[in-house]
Structures are given as C-alpha cells and as structure tokens.
Image: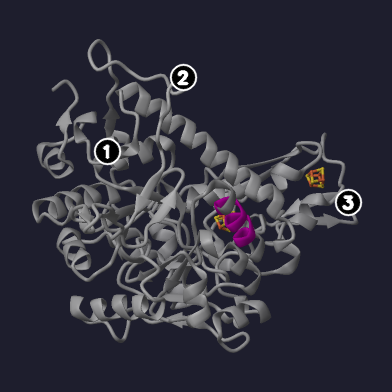
Amino acid sequence: MAINFLYPDYEVIRNYDRCIACRVCERQCANEVHQYDPDTGRMTADESKCVNCHRCVSLCPTRALKIVKTDHTFKENANWSGQTIQEVYRQAGSGGVLLSSMGNPKEYPVYWDKILINASQVTNPSIDPLREPMETRVYLGKKPEGIERDKNGKIINNLTPQLKLNTPIMFSAMSYGSISYNAHASLARAAEQLGIYYNTGEGGLHKDFYQYGPNTIVQVASGRFGVYKDYLEAGAAIEIKMGQGAKPGIGGHLPGAKVGEDVSKTRMIPLHSDAISPAPHHDIYSIEDLRQLVFSLKEATEYKKPIIVKIAAVHNVAAIASGVARSGADIIAIDGFRGGTGAAPTRIRDNVGIPIELALASVDQRLRDEGIRDQVSVVVGGSIRSSADVVKAIALGADACYIATSALLALGCHLCRSCQSGKCNWGIATQRPDLVRRLNPDIGSERLINLITAWDHEIKEMMGGMGINSIEALKGNRLMLRGIGLGDRELSILGIKHAGE
Ligand code: SF4
Ligand code: SF4
C-alpha cells in the first residue's frame, strides 16, 4: 500500500463529558468527518476530511466540539514551509493542478490596513450624521461633458443610462452554479430592498430571478453561458468580464457534477457537462474589438443599459483601464488579487495579479491625467472587508465597491476555502439539494440587508468625521488619507502622504 505523506490540517476535539451522541455532527457534515461507533456508543472523527467549516461546532447542542489547527509539524525551514512540502506531496500523488477557492491568502501587504482616515477638529467642523443629511447615493456611468439647452432654454437630458445606488456598495459577480439557488435568491432580494445591485456572474440568469432585473447586473463572459436577448434585456446593466482578480489570465471551470438540471437550463449547456469558459473572449484581441462588443451590446439593448467592463488588477492596469475607458464602456470594474472565487488553480490565485489598492490609485490618476475620468465610473472589488475599506477606496478614487466574500460571510460562510469541492455545509457554494436547503433566503437576505445598512451608517459617521456630507465630495479626496509604515514608492503610487505629514 502506498504511504500517505499528508497529515490532517485540523484536529477535532470532542469533549466526551458533554457529547450526548446525538449524531447531529454526523448528519450535518457533508465531508463525512464524524461517525457513530455502535460498539462503543461513542462518536469518532476522520480528521483527514475536515475542512474547518465549523458547521458541526455551530450546531452541536452541547457545545462539545472544537476544531483546532494541528500542531503537528514538518521539519520546516525559512524556505520550505509545511504547506509547500504538503503541496509537493499532493501533486506527486495526483499529477494534477492544485485547486483552491476564495481569494489569495498569502502575506502580501494589505494596504487598506496601512492607510488611515482623517477627522476634522477645529476648522471645517465635523458633521453629525444623526442630525444632518448625509448623501451616500451614487450614480454610476458616464457623466455629461456639459449642460445643453434647447432653444427655449430648457435643459436637454443627454445623460447616458446610469445605475443608481443608495449606498456605494454592490454584490459582485457570483454565478448560479458556483453558488446555490438560495444564495442567489438571498443576494437578489437584498439588492432589491437596499436599492443596489447584485451580479449574475457568468452563469446566466435563472428564470425565477427575472423579477429582480432592475437590481441585476447580467454578465457576458468568454463562455457566453446563458447569454441571449431576454437575458441582456432583463438586467439594469451588462458587465463584460475580461478578467477576474482571483485568476487573472485564465478562464473558468464549473465541473459537470455541479451542472444539474436547473444550472444546465440557465447556462444553456447540456446536463452534467463541464462548463469551461475560455481564457480570452475569442472575438476580442484589442481595444477596438472590445469596443465592438460594447457597442453590439448597447445596440442589442437599444442604448438603454450601461456597459461595465470588468478587468483583473494586473501589471499596467492603468494603461489597460485607459483603453477600456476609450472603448465606450460606461463603468470599469477592477478586481484585485484577493478577490474570491469558487475554484481557481492555487498557483494562479496566490501569485498572479496585484493588490486592488495600488491598481485603483494608479487607474484613477491615469484617467485624471488623460482628462477622461468623467467618461467612466470606477468600481473596485477584491476583498473589501469593511465600511472603512469602502471609505478608503472612495477617497482613493473609486465611485463604488463590489463585495462578495463579505456578502458570503454574512450568509454564513466560514471561509473554509473548499468551495471547489461542491460540498459547502452552509448551503452556499453547492448544488446538492440537501445542502442548498440549509440556507434560508429569508434569513440570508435579512442578514445581507443588515450588513449593508450597518456599513452605510458607518460610512456616514466616517464622512461626517471628515466634515464631508456626500460621497461625491469624498471621491478621489486623497488628502483625507495618510499612509502608515509605507515606503516612498508605495506612497507615491497611492498618491497619499505619510501619517504625520
Ligand atoms: S453534535 Fe455534539 S453532542 Fe451531538 S454527537 Fe456531535 S459532538 Fe456529540
Ligand atoms: S462558501 Fe462554503 S465552501 Fe466556500 S469557503 Fe464559504 S463555507 Fe467554505
């Protein structure tokens, strides 16, 4: 028998004084970690299968369980960590590409945590958001170059279609297939109630969700899954996905096991076939080609929908964004390398792309330098974790933020990073009907509404503290930011001073 060189990452600690052998943990774990031993009348655990999703810990009625990181260690050194050693063993055993999910977990700098926000003191007094109006509503899309009037002096409305958001936050693209029906239902209902948008991702739009069209962004990705006229017309905006922060430069792959009847109908692909979207769009090899698709989509929807072009944050992102702005797109979405995903090759997730903070600052600066900043709105995503990140992103130049991982956390995700297995115990990244049922869309949407409402309050408080009463006045206001512990080059790219200056 071949030796298994791998060791479990976690240990299941069961307090047998508390355990009543109710077998809840056994029923709740899709990874089959827990078993009941009828000979001893006790529960046992196969720790090699544990992904630390905390489903059993949360549902154990007697709080008998805890999961701890194993303190077993390899003979590590500064060059060879235990994880690196295990990955070599894994590939030597399988011969396959390592797969992971969610965003880049490596210890690259998180610039949001190295940026501090200003507050007014004596002059330019702060504003109390409980007593004075604060405007967090934003409109995304091209801004008119000037005011035009007809011969009677009446203003001519020459606005291109805009997206109106009650708060500068949207739910980022997550496809039906990678996440469950109930997760999509939760996002759609919350977006409608909040007056914001959720995004279909590349998986098409389930017929049940056409009713949420006014709060839906429909995506056109390289696989063109589920794209047809009704789909394009159903949404409030259309997003062309050129890249994704978690896996820049490659396509997507939804395994056939996840392509059940509903997903296959929605994606318009055969039942149980792998949904593989190619790395490039086969009709886009230049900005001129992108422009053709932008205008084809505008034409197909009678110029009633703003077009978003989503790109991954990569080297030369500012030049790429400048090209996108000239392609006729109304909104550029930039996705940083910490952006989540249902499945990505681990090496790509962990080594390709750049932090969203640096990408945003350089894109905003470039568009300003070229005098085209008002021709597009800029939306950023890729691990926006709190209202403070939103405020910093807007002060760095964003018009709004996309969130996804935070939204999944609100739905109950425990960041176990095993979405690619399709066995999400929280009913989110799965298509197994018994698991999907675990996520109640009524509760899910309520929790999402709570999260965004809380963030909106906090954004208003931070804005008030700066003496700013509208998102428009915060946008690109880098004087409100200071760096801490950053080098001159980083400060220069971020366009901010160091704390104390
Ligand atoms: S859920 Fe808790 S009490 Fe029930 S069998 Fe598992 S560990 Fe024991
Ligand atoms: S969505 Fe589910 S599988 Fe994916 S990280 Fe969250 S809890 Fe784990």
Q: Between 192 and 59, which is closer to the camera in this rendering?
A: 192
Q: Residue furthest front?
A: 152
Left or right for 66, reference 307: right
Residue denoted by label 3: 40
Question: Which element is circle 3 on?
Answer: loop
Q: At which x and y percent is residue 181?
A: 65, 65
Amino acid type indicated by mark 1: Ala
Q: Nearer the viewer, residue 377 or 484?
A: 377
Report the residue marked by disc 2: 131
Q: Amino acid at mark 3?
A: Thr
In terms of sequence position, does the residue under pointer 1 or pointer 2 come before the other? Answer: 2
Q: Residues within 10 Å of mark 2 (few under 14, many from 20)?
A: few
State the separation of the CA atoms marked 3 and 2: 65 Å
Name the residue carrying label 1: 395
**Dominant secondary structure of the magenta stretch?**
helix
Residues in magenta?
183-191
Establish if 463 lies above or below 196: above
